[in-house]
């Protein structure tokens, strides 16, 4: 939200606080995410949805490895393409950027929608493979990321400074916290990059379920979540072809340099 520097008045502030606390707010239960224009400062919606998070592991160590201009390029590329992938999901309703974390709220009332969200998570993973290859080509340090996806109930609210045009939609609830926590666990220690809630896993088709392994965090007999190194096959095939082509070009260049060196020696 961009600031507009309106003068603060503690008297007006007191009245706004009173109005908010005294308001008879209504929080309607809905099955799908409503449009933003249905939100006011006195209502909200409880809705089932999926939350998808992706962020960089060990980002605090990157400044020691790269200059600020390079860091800017790395972050800009990461954020740009994470937003692009999540935004391509037709069920995506909101996208947020918070530091080196990108998250999305997806409207997933049906199982096929949850499967589409899982496909988006796999696409994110393959996009990161492409990004890391590009980084390595420039001599930059590749990044490691965690991805988390959860499904559940969230409260959708309009929040901000009433009358200032400074406001935004916020999402509160276990589904957001769970997806964020799952993302935080991804690619940490021995954990795989994609972490999936049990509710999401229960709604996946058999093929997608077969790509995941159970995670036992607290009790060996209980499954707390699922994980996997899931990829987009078409993207991975394209990346492999690009690497092979680049390798051929390098070999040709080395051959030409060797030939030129031999001719010069004569």
Image (tube, rainbow, N blue to C red):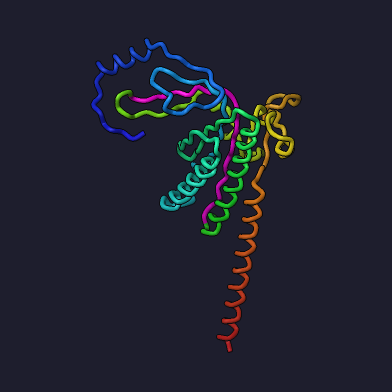
Report x, y in % for residue 18. Answer: 33, 12
User: Does the magenta portion include 223?
Assistant: no
- Foreground: 103 or 48? 48
Does 208 sit left or right of 242 as displayed? Answer: right
**Which residue lies at the image location 41% right of the left edge and 27% below the top edge?**
37
User: Does the magenta portion include 156?
Assistant: yes
Which corner quadrant of the image does residue 224 belong to?
top right
**Which residue lies at the image location 55% right of the left edge and 38% below the top edge?**
90
- Foreground: 111 or 186? 111
Q: Is residue 174 visible?
A: no
- The number of numbered badges drawn on the structure is 0
Chain part drawn in magenta: 140-161
**Which residue lies at the image location 64% right of the left edge and 62% below the top edge?**
244
- Foreground: 44 or 217? 44
Q: Is residue 66 visible?
A: yes
Report x, y in % for residue 210. Answer: 74, 38
Q: Where, quadrant-wise, is the N terminus in this rendering?
A: top left
Report x, y in % for residue 29. Answer: 53, 18
Report x, y in % for residue 207. Answer: 73, 39
Q: Where, quadrant-wise, is the C terminus in this rendering?
A: bottom right
- Foreground: 210 or 68? 210
Does 157 sit left or right of 183 as displayed? Answer: left
Magenta: main secondary structure equals: strand
Instruction: Give the residue furthest to the bottom.
Output: 266
> In this picture, is 37 found above or below 21?
below
**Which residue lies at the image location 49% right of the left edge and 26% below the top edge?**
34
């Amino acid at each position: 939200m961009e600031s507009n520097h309106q003068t603060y008045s503690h008297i007006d502030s007191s009245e706004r606080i009173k109005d908010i606390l005294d308001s008879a707010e209504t929080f309607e239960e809905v099955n799908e995410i409503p449009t933003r224009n249905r939100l006011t400062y006195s209502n909200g919606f409880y809705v089932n949805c999926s939350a998808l998070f992706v962020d960089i592991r060990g980002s605090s160590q990157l400044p020691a490895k790269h200059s600020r201009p390079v860091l800017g390029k790395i972050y800009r590329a990461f954020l740009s393409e994470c937003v692009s992938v999540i935004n391509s999901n037709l069920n995506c309703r909101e996208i947020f950027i918070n530091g080196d974390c990108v998250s999305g709220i997806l409207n997933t009332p049906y199982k096929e929608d949850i499967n589409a969200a899982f496909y988006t998570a796999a696409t994110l993973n393959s996009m990161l493979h492409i990004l890391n290859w590009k980084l390595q080509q420039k001599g930059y340090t590749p990044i490691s990321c965690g991805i988390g996806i959860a499904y559940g109930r969230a409260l959708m609210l309009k929040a901000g400074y009433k009358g200032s045009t400074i406001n935004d939609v916020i999402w509160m609830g276990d589904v957001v916290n769970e997806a964020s926590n799952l993302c935080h666990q991804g690619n940490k220690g021995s954990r795989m990059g994609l972490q999936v809630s049990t509710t999401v896993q229960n709604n996946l088709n058999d093929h997608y379920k077969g790509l995941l392994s159970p995670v036992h965090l607290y009790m060996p007999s209980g499954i707390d979540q699922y994980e996997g190194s899931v990829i987009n096959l078409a993207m991975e095939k394209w990346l492999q072809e690009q690497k092979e082509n680049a390798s051929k070009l390098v070999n040709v260049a080395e051959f030409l340099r060797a030939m030129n060196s031999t001719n010069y020696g004569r």
